[in-house]
Image (cartoon, coloured by chain):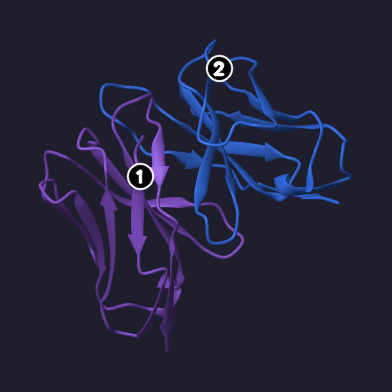
């Protein structure tokens, strides 16, 4: 049982390049999330998917797109990377039931934009 | 939207002392309050959570208290150990697809 798996773990891009961060979970969770973590600023929600087939913007969606490929997979795409997008990106998942449930995080992707 | 403020941003204690981290939230409809621990270079992991129908919850050396009227909740760690050193995040959510708003984190250092 791997939990939440993110790939790649590290990536360096040049300004203007594009890339997709991959996330998969094997816990049969309905909800999935993408966060970015910058020093001293905690975790900020980029996009989330409450259930398969739905996606919604979070707090900081500009410059990003997402795809909920199926129940297991939720990808984050940077179409034209900018230095301001240098950050650590975490994917998370949770059950979607009547009461809120804790989120399970992946190990993160450390992304540098030069 | 929800706003969560967390204090202090850094906390240093001697081994064996207690540590308290406080968070306030703005949305009175929030009903779920988890706490996550993040060790250096690692993923955030849930350590304890509390729901709005409960005022206090304990798990060994860790406890969380909730004051719905004042809209604040606190993490209490007793008998701190060096391995408690980490960044701690509080969060609040209101049942909207489990979407949580996080505080900015508290860096706890436990000195041996």
Q: Colour of chain B?
A: purple
Q: Nearer the viewer, mark 2 or mark 1?
A: 1
Disc 2 crowd, CA 10 A, few/some/many (<14, 14-19, 20+) = some
Among the chains, which one is blue? A
- Let me know if residue B60 appears in the view: yes
Count of picture labels: 2
In front: B5, or B108? Answer: B5
Identify the element where label 1 is drawn: loop
Question: Mark 2 to mark 1: distance in Å?
Answer: 30 Å
> What residue sits 45% from the left and 20% below the top?
A50
Q: Position of residue A17 (x, y in %)?
A: 88, 36
> What residue sits 60% from the left and 31% below the top?
A61
In front: B42, or B91? Answer: B91
- Point out the image quarter for the N terminus of chain B: top left
Q: Chain of mark 2?
A: A
Q: Position of residue B87 (x, y in %)?
A: 46, 64
The residue indicated by pointer 2 is A71
């Amino acid at each position: 049982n791997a939990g939440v798996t993110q790939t790649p773990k590290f990536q360096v891009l040049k300004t203007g390049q594009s890339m997709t961060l991959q996330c998969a979970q094997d816990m049969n969770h309905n909800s999935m999330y993408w966060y970015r973590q910058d020093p001293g600023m905690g975790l900020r929600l980029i996009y989330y998917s409450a259930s398969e087939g739905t996606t919604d913007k979070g707090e900081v969606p500009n410059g990003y797109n997402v795809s909920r490929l199926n129940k297991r997979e939720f990808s984050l795409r940077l179409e034209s990377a900018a230095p301001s997008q240098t950050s650590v990106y975490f994917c998370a998942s949770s059950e979607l039931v009547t009461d809120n449930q804790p989120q399970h995080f992946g190990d993160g992707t450390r992304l540098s934009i030069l | 939207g929800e706003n969560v403020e967390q204090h202090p941003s850094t906390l240093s204690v001697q081994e064996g002392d207690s540590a308290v981290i406080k968070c306030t939230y703005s949305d009175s409809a929030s009903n779920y309050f988890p706490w996550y621990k993040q060790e250096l270079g690692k993923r955030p992991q849930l350590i304890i959570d509390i729901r709005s129908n409960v005022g206090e919850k304990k798990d060994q050396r860790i406890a969380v208290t909730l004051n719905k009227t004042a809209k604040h909740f606190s993490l209490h760690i007793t008998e701190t150990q060096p391995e408690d050193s980490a960044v701690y995040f509080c969060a609040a959510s209101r049942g909207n697809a489990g979407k949580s708003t996080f505080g900015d984190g508290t860096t706890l250092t436990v000195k041996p």
